[in-house]
Amino acid sequence: MNIDLTSTFKDARQLTNTWKTRYSASEYPQKVIMNIFYRKYTIEKMWPTIFNTKYSNWETAYASLKNKYGEVALTINPVLESKLKANDKVTSIRFSDFTSYIQAAASGNKDALKGIEYTYFLHRIFDELILVWVAMVVSGDTKINAIAKITRAVIAEMPINEYAVIEQIFDQLGAEKYLQSLFIKEMQNNL
């Protein structure tokens, strides 16, 4: 990736550490998964109007998107549990996709817990890449050119009008490999 998301990674680490102290070992796995969906439902709610406002530069656009994200997130909080119970799909996932992992991790399965945490970090990277990408688009880049600037990959022109589509593109263009490089840096105390 041609972008530095170290601060996103550090924020995700800080949040998981906070949740580990705040919640019991049996509650923590579900809280982590709930946060993935909290963020995804927030971006999904923003999506219909996310490209409407134009900006002169991507940094201003990004700051505005982050502010808007905070505002929209407040509207998701009261309905999050009902959305999870309804098992509403967002991008390519549903809460029920994680039920067995949550149950296993809550029962002490360390591999299931690692999988949940890894999934949380990966979706934080996806969602941050998407917000940066939107910021670049609303400040004048084409959707394809913004992808190229972020990933250094050139892709064919295609319609990218859905949250799930851009997430899939970033998945295919190395978001997970980038996340793994951040984990390695963390282990080496290089963050």
Image (cartoon, rainbow, N blue to C red):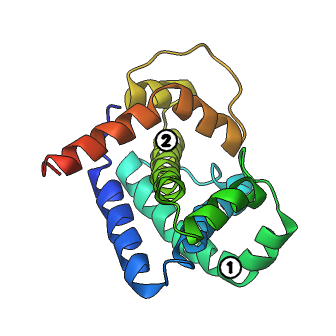
Please tell me which residue lies in front, 157 or 169.
Answer: 169
For residue 101, which quarter of the picture?
A: bottom right
Q: Amino acid at mark 2?
A: Trp
Query: Relative to 99, is 137 on the left or the right?
Result: left
Q: Is residue 9 left or right of residue 80?
A: left
Which x, y percent locates residue 1?
A: 35, 32
- Image coordinates of residue 189 in percent, x first then y, are 13, 52
- Badge 2 crowding class, 10 Å Cα cut-off, few under 14, some 14 to 19, many 20 or more, is many
What residue appears at the point 49 percent right and 78 percent down from the top-left corner? 25
The relative height of residue 67 versus residue 46 in the rendered view (above or below) is below
Image: 53 above or below 143: below
Q: Which residue is mark 2?
A: 133
Q: Classify residue 157 as left or right of residue 5.
A: right
Question: Which residue is depicted at the point 82% across and 60% down?
Answer: 88
| Proximity of marks 1 and 2: CB atoms separated by less than 8 Å | no
Q: Give the number of marks.
A: 2
Q: At numbered mark 2, what does the secondary structure look like: helix, strand or loop?
A: helix
Q: Can you see residue 57?
A: no
Q: Is residue 88 above or below residue 152?
A: below
The answer to whether any part of residue 78 appears in the image is: yes
Which residue is under mark 1?
75
**For residue 111, side relative to residue 104 (left or right):** left
Q: CA distance from mark 1 to mark 2?
A: 23 Å
Quick one: 71 or 141, which is closer to the camera?
Answer: 71
Looking at this view, name the residue that lies furthest to the front. 108
Q: Residue at x 71, y 84 (%)?
A: 78
Question: Which of disc 2 and disc 1 is earlier in sequence?
Answer: 1
Amino acid of disc 1: Thr
Residue 73 position within the rendered picture, expressed as x and y whole percent measured from the top left: 60, 74
Residue 50 lies, in percent from the top left, at: 64, 54
